[in-house]
C-alpha cells in the first residue's frame, strides 16, 4: 500500500514533494518528543502550493487515507504526530507572501511562513503582529492558527485568532475555500473563520492566512519582581490587574523555572527567589514610562526584590523568558508539560497544587507561564532513560486536569488537545461534543482530517 501511495503522491507532487517510505524520523514527532511520543506514517507529502494541497487532500478523500497536517512540528499536544497508514501533509513549502498592505495594516501569507517571519515582515513596515508563542522561529502561522496559539503579549493583545481576518482552507473534501473577507469588520456570514481557529487540523488544511496588524509600540519597559512565596507573587498579580493599567505582558515563574533558566538571565537574579513576576508596559515613551512606574508600585508591596531594567533591556529579557521551556527540559532530559488554565485568582492554588501532585508521584515539578491569563505551564520533569519516571509523569496528567477543573479551569489554555489530551476532552458536556462532531461532518465528511486528534470519538 505504501509503495502505491508513494507513486500516486509523486504523480501529484513530483519526486521532490514526497518521502515514501518515511526515513527521516523528524516527521514523526512534535514538541512532545521530550515525553517520548513518536508516530508512524505511510508517506510525507510536501506540496509546493495550495493547488497541490487540494490535489493531495482530494486524493486522500477519494481513497480514505488519513491526513495529518503539519506546521513547524512544535506543538505540545501530539496533534501533528502521525499514525500508521497516514499521510503527513507538511506546509513547509508554502512560504509566499500573498498580500502586503501596510497602509491598511494588513498582511496575508501562506501557512508555512514562520511566526518569527510574520513578526519581522510586520516590523519592516513599522507594524506589529502581537502573538508571540515561544517557538516562533520554528512554528508556522498555519500551525498557530490551527492551535489558536498564545504567548506573553497575548495578555494585552489577545491570542492568534483575534488577529485573523480570513483563512484559505482546503476542506476534507478537497474543496478550496476562503472564509472571512480580510476586512477588520464583516458580519455578512456566520463566523466560519472562528471554527477553523483552534481546529488542530481536524476540519481542513489551512493554506493561507490574512492578518490584522497594528503600529509597533515605541518602547517596551519591563519590570521584574521577586517573591518569597507563590502566594505573595499571586497577590501582586491581583494588585497589578486591579491597578487600571493593562500590562502588555504579565508572566510568572516559580522557583524551579527560575533556577532552570537563571544562567541565561541578562543580569543577576536574586538568590532564594521562590516566585517571580515579569510585567511590561509598552506604548509611547511618556505613556509606557508612567505605566511602568504604576506597575512597579503594584508589584512592590509583597516583593522581596524589584528590578526595573534599563530601557534597552526588553529584548534580552524576552529572549530569556522564551528559553525557560528549554532550560526546564535540560534539567533532567525529559519533561511532560501541560498548559492548564484557571481563573487568575486561583493561580497560587494551582501552582501549589502542581507541586503537591509532583511530591505525591515522586517527580520534580515546576510551573511558569502567563499569570495574567491564569495559564500555567505545569511540568513534570524526569530522566528520559527511566521508563518508570515517564510512566509516573503520564499517570499524573489526568490528576493535573482534575486539579484545573476543580479550580474552575480548563485542561488547555493554548497548546490544544491533540492526541495527548483527547481522553480528558471526552469529559466535556455531551451537547458540546455532539455539536463539534456535527461541524466536523460538514467540513470533513469522510473523516480523513487528523482523525483521533482534538475531537473525542
Ligand atoms: C519551546 C516552545 C515554546 C512554546 N511556547 C508556546 C507559547 O508560548 N504559546 C503557545 O500557544 N504555544 C507554545 N508552544 C507550542 C507550539 O509552538 C504552538 O502550539 C504552535 O502554535 C504550533 O505551531 P506549529 O506550526 O509548530 O504546529 P504543529 O506542531 O506542526 O501542529 C500543531 C497542530 O496544528 C495542526 N496544523 C499545523 N499546521 C496546520 C495547517 N496549516 N492547517 C491545519 N492544521 C494545521 C496540526 O495537525 C496539529 O494538530 C511552544 C512550543 C515550544 C517547543
Image (cartoon, grey):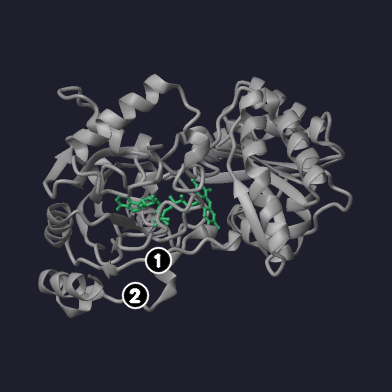
Q: What quarter of the picture does the N terminus occupy?
A: bottom left
Residue of label 1: 40
Q: Position of residue 315 (x, y in %)?
A: 58, 56
Residue drawn at point x = 42 percent, y = 58 percent: 81
Q: Quadrant of residue 223?
A: top right
* CA gap, disc 1 and disc 2: 8 Å
Q: Which mark is residue 22?
A: 2
Q: Position of residue 322 (x, y in %)?
A: 59, 55
Residue drawn at point x = 75 percent, y = 49 percent: 365
Question: In terms of secondary structure, where does tag 2 sit?
Answer: loop
Q: Are marks 1 and 2 in contact (CB under 8 Å)?
A: yes
> Above or below — where is 334 with respect to 198?
below
Q: In the image, is 176 to the left or to the right of 147? A: left
The front one of 22 and 297 is: 22
Q: What is the total number of numbered labels drawn onto the structure image?
A: 2
Q: Position of residue 437 (x, y in %)?
A: 30, 31
Amino acid at each position: 500500500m505504501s509503495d502505491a501511495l508513494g507513486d500516486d503522491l509523486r504523480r501529484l507532487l513530483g519526486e521532490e514533494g514526497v518521502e515514501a517510505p518515511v526515513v527521516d524520523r523528524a516527521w514523526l514527532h512534535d514538541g512532545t518528543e521530550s515525553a517520548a511520543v513518536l508516530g508512524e506514517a505511510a508517506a510525507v507529502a510536501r506540496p509546493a502550493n495550495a493547488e497541490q494541497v487540494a490535489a493531495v487532500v482530494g486524493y486522500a478523500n477519494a481513497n480514505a487515507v488519513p491526513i495529518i497536517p503539519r506546521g513547524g512540528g512544535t506543538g505540545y499536544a501530539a496533534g501533528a504526530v502521525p499514525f500508521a497508514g497516514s499521510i503527513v501533509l507538511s506546509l513547509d513549502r508554502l512560504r509566499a507572501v500573498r498580500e502586503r498592505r501596510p497602509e491598511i495594516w494588513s498582511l496575508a501569507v501562506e501557512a508555512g511562513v514562520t511566526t518569527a517571519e510574520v513578526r519581522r515582515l510586520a516590523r519592516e513596515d513599522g507594524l506589529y503582529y502581537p502573538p508571540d508563542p515561544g517557538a516562533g522561529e520554528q512554528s508556522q502561522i498555519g500551525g498557530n492558527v490551527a492551535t489558536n496559539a498564545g504567548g506573553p503579549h497575548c495578555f494585552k493583545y489577545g491570542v492568534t485568532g483575534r488577529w485573523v481576518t480570513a483563512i484559505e482552507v482546503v476542506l476534507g473534501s478537497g474543496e478550496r475555500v476562503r472564509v472571512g473577507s480580510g476586512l477588520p469588520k464583516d458580519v455578512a456570514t456566520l463566523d466560519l473563520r472562528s471554527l477553523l481557529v483552534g481546529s488542530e487540523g481536524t476540519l481542513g488544511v489551512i493554506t493561507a492566512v490574512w492578518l490584522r496588524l497594528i503600529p509597533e509600540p515605541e518602547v517596551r519597559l519591563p519590570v521584574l519582581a521577586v517573591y518569597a512565596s507563590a502566594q505573595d507573587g499571586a497577590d501582586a498579580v491581583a494588585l497589578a490587574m486591579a491597578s487600571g493599567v493593562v500590562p502588555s505582558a504579565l508572566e510568572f515563574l516559580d522557583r524551579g523555572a527560575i533556577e532552570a533558566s537563571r544562567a541565561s538571565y541578562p543580569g543577576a537574579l536574586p538568590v532564594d527567589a521562590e516566585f517571580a513576576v515579569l510585567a511590561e508596559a509598552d506604548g509611547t515613551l511618556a505613556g509606557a514610562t508612567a505605566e511602568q512606574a504604576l506597575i512597579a508600585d503594584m508589584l512592590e508591596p509583597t516583593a522581596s526584590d524589584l528590578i526595573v531594567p534599563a530601557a534597552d533591556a526588553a529584548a534580552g529579557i524576552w529572549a530569556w523568558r522564551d528559553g525557560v521551556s528549554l532550560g526546564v527540559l535540560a534539567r533532567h532530559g525529559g519533561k511532560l508539560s501541560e498548559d492548564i488554565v484557571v481563573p487568575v485568582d486561583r493561580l497560587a492554588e494551582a501552582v501549589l497544587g502542581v507541586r503537591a501532585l509532583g511530591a505525591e508521584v515522586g517527580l520534580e515539578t515546576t510551573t511558569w507561564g502567563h499569570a495574567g491569563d491564569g495559564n500555567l505551564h505545569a511540568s513534570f520533569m524526569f530522566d528520559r532513560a527511566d521508563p518508570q519516571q515517564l510512566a509516573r509523569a503520564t499517570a499524573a496528567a489526568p490528576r493535573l486536569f482534575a486539579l484545573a477543573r476543580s479550580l474552575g479551569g480548563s485542561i488547555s489554555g493554548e497548546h490544544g488537545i491533540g492526541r495527548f489530551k483527547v481522553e480528558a476532552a471526552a469529559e466535556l458536556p455531551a451537547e458540546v461534543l455532539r455539536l463539534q462532531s456535527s461541524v466536523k461532518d460538514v467540513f470533513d465528511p469522510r473523516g480523513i482530517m487528523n482523525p483521533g486528534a482534538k475531537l473525542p470519538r
